[in-house]
Image (spheres, grey):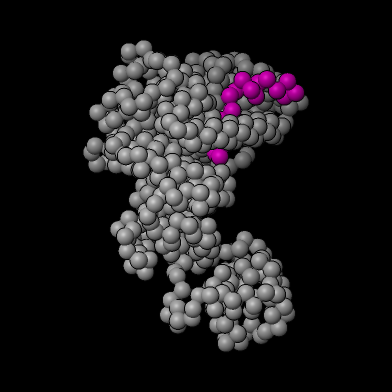
Amino acid sequence: MDEPSMPTPPAGTTPPPAPSSPPGPPTPPIPLAELLASKDLGLRRVAGPAEAELLWVHTSEMADPYPYLLGGELLLSAGVLLTDPDHYVGRLVAAGAAALGFGVRPVHETVPGALIEACDRQGLPLLEVPPETPFTAIARAVWRLMAEARHRKLRRVTRAQQALATAAARPDPVPAVLHQLATQLGGRAVLLTARGEEVHAAGRRLPPEPAGALTRLARVVARERPGSPASATDTHGDTHLSAYALGGGDGLVLALAAGRRESGDHTVAGIAVVLLSLLAAPHQGADAAGRSAALVRMLLGASPDEVAPLLGATGPWTVIHARRTDGTPADALTAGALGASLGTALVDAGRGGGEAVRLLLPLPGAAAGPLPEAEAEADRITPQPGWTLGASAPTPVTALDAADSLAARALAHAQATRAPLTVDAPVSGLAALVPPEEAAAHARALLAPLTAPLADTLRCWLSLHGSWDRTAVALGVHRNTVRQRIGRCGELLDADLDDMDVRAELWFALRQG
């Protein structure tokens, strides 16, 4: 057996409810039809509906596998302890299993007729697994199909992101983004006010009934009352409906309707939410619209020097890098929620994987004052539950490239020290007494023998008080690699890195870069 023995609940007792929305794997579900189409497996559906979506594969010979199921499984069994098919199937349905694969021989020569009847009666797809097909081959086929589906989803999301970014750079960005979103989703995209008034729309028009249902759904997420959800979904007949509240505090809602729902739709919609939150705020003048478009282009990779004239005197800015504390990738919606908590809609969720979320936090309260006064504004950045943050000191728009590097450095330091927030503070104290030009010249001369990777390693190592393990964590390398690099730094600089005076001078020099 696969699991330890567990008694079946006594008759008359109520089993614990199956999870209504089990945590899904980081891959799209697989249609049962795709698995049945794998001819080399020889699977045959003998009972139950033809449609199902598979999230997992699990093998069990327990009389009652209910306690070990999350929902969405293709459960594989040879029926070793099968005595009451109707009860067995009822438990699988109650646990949310997607389908049952029954292996014939050596325990059963054929699929039991009572099991076929129970699956037909209770609506559970039943597959006959021929003797020559190992259960591991079925599991491997499902994982392969999931990997292919994941790649298709990533390609689709990447193409949609590029198309939406191009639309955002057009002279009429809001209608262009809505049109592109409707095209990508194959449906209708509408921008509505909190009262349900249509601002812009794209895609084919809806009949009156689904259009009314979409408007009612949009009111659910409209930010007119505390506690409104950020998004909501519904169906009307064969039409899938969804609504997303936009950032900016104006109560705008993005409402979507589509006849089909594909993997990646939620992510594509999230990208559009971020863009429209920047672009669609009503009542903004021409200058504000120009600034929003400039910031979008900056987030998509333009040089700060190109957009500085459009931003005017707005600023200074703080750049924030963030990662989920539990290591899970952040999508556009979770990144947008983080931005809302920090008070900005200027969020770049990256491309998933291990990339950090980047945020631009404007500090309008200090826009008219000198930069030192703006440093107090950085205190407004507070730790966020579930996130590790690294923030730069406030900086003018023309220095955002450098601030981006400082935020990345601060995030690495926060992760290494397990701190929820680290701010890369500007040079202060005694170091501020040295003229910046002289300090920079001294740093260039002192650090000239070091390559950029060596200098970064030395800076990180010194900032973490010479800890090999924490530096390895911050840089994402092995601790032996850190030792080798620090040893090489000592050789090239001809310096004793255990000497506190040497460390202090190097730290001062490294802080200039």
Q: Quadrant of the C terminus?
A: bottom right
Is-magenta flag for residue 26? yes
Point 60% across, 85% down: residue = 502
Q: Is residue 87 visible?
A: no
Picture coordinates of residue 413 (x, y %)?
52, 66
Q: How many marks?
A: 0
* Above-or-below relation of 293 to 415: above
State left or right for residue 107 relative to residue 335: right
Point out the image quarter for the N terminus: top right
Answer left or right for 57 relative to 359: right
> Is residue 110 a member of the stretch shown in magenta?
no
Q: Quadrant of residue 254?
A: top left
**Residue name at image x 55 percent, y 82 percent:** 504
Residue at horizontal 40 percent and vertical 15 percent from the top: 205
Q: Nearer the viewer, residue 245 or 182?
A: 182
| Nearest the eye: 477 or 444 | 444
Q: Residue at point 62% right, 74% down? A: 444
Task: Read off the magenta span.
Answer: 25-41
